[in-house]
Amino acid sequence: MSKVGEVNKLKVADVSEVVEGIGKEVVIEGHSIALFKLKSGKIKAIENSCPHKGGPLSQGIVSGENVFCPLHDWKVCVNDGMVQGPDEGCVQTYKVDVDDDSVYLYI
Ligand code: FES
């Protein structure tokens, strides 16, 4: 772990553990976070709790840059955390860094 301003940079996974199209949950300092690898190879991190009723987004079905909540199918963008219409809301997003084979989050 290293400090960047008031934010901690933490290793949360190996790159090989994050598979395209399949969410991965990590729990960091009490925060449940969902990691997703996009087709482009970019890794995104969002809060692992749907703004509707707290469904585990890491278990949702990934389509492009969105994930569908496994409980009631709300569609959440993994880039900006925004719920896509017709529903409304958002989840927290986390800045991701990939260094060699490691995935880091700024928490
Ligand atoms: S809890 Fe996610 S859509 Fe209902």
Image (cartoon, rainbow, N blue to C red):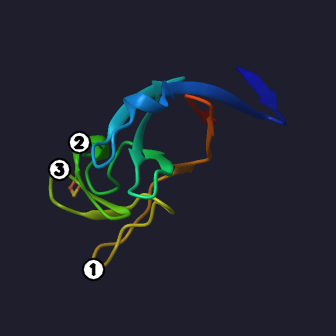
Type of the residue with mark 1:
Pro
Type of the residue with mark 2:
Gln
Residue at image mark 3: 70
Disc number for residue 36: none
Residue 9: % across, % down: 69, 30
- SS label for mark 1: loop
Query: Which of marks 2 and 3 precedes in the sequence?
Result: 2
Q: Residue at x 62, y 30 (%)?
A: 100
Q: Is disc 2 surrounded by few (<14), some (14 to 19) or many (20+) residues within 10 Å?
A: some
**Mark 2 or 1, closer to the camera:** 2
Q: Residue at x 33, y 46 (%)?
A: 20
Disc 3 versus disc 2: distance between alpha carbons?
Answer: 6 Å
Q: Nearer the viewer, residue 88 or 22?
A: 22
Q: Residue at x 27, y 79 (%)?
A: 86
Type of the residue with mark 3:
Pro
- SS label for mark 2: helix
Q: Is mark 3 within 8 Å of ligand 1?
A: yes
Disc number for residue 59: 2
